[in-house]
Image (cartoon, grey):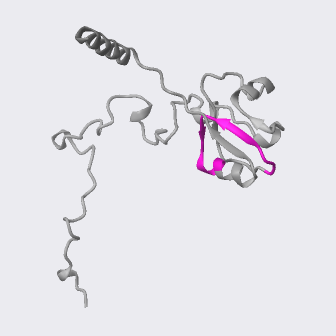
Amino acid sequence: MNELTRLTPPAGGGVKEKKRVGRGQASGQGKTAGRGGKGQKARTGNMNFIGFEGGQMPIQRRIPKRDLESLGLAEVDLDKLVESGAVKVRKHGLKVLGDGELTKAVSVKANKFSASAREKIEKAGGKVEEIVITPKATPQQRKKEEKKAAAAAKKA
């Protein structure tokens, strides 16, 4: 039978105690309790959830979302979406998400697909083609390549 006097801490040590903040200057976490000075983030009940942008419209709500089913296209790619007016800017690429249902076969060419989108398109009899964009070289990378080329030319 277990008795309170015979209990031992779990392997690897006991349970770590919660840090007691705001308990005087000597504790190292006194006065502002590790929250810095004033401001929204210093207040209780501050808006610190994932995706909060200080009251600005969050990016997940700013980015436009379109339904493949309602577009009425047999083949979907960025050029056709711009043509139809569903997308205005083509420089950011195209990612297909798996929200909603798809009943007709659609051939889709995009930069990225979520796993559920890929599954739903293929299940409906459509085709998925991922367009890979090679990232542009940064100025530092270009400079490094130029130095290598110059050193190779010097040796030859």
Magenta stretch: give its range.
103-118
**Which residue sits at x=21%, y=79%?**
7
Depth check, front residue: 155 or 99: 155
State the quadrant of the C terminus: top left
Residue, far right: 72
> In the visual, does 15 lie left or right of 66?
left
**Which residue sits at x=69%, y=36%?**
65
Residue, far left: 26
Quarter where residue 22 is shown: top left
**Which residue sits at x=19%, y=38%?**
25
Quarter where residue 66 is shown: top right
How far across and how far down the image is residue 1, in percent?
Answer: 25, 91
How far across and how far down the image is residue 33, in percent?
Answer: 29, 39
> In the visual, does 61 lie left or right of 135?
right
Vertical arrangement, residue 126 with respect to residue 91, above or below: below
Depth check, front residue: 4 or 105: 105
Depth check, front residue: 59 or 37: 59
> In the visual, does 130 lie left or right of 75?
left
**Which residue sits at x=71%, y=22%?**
88
Depth check, front residue: 47 or 143: 143
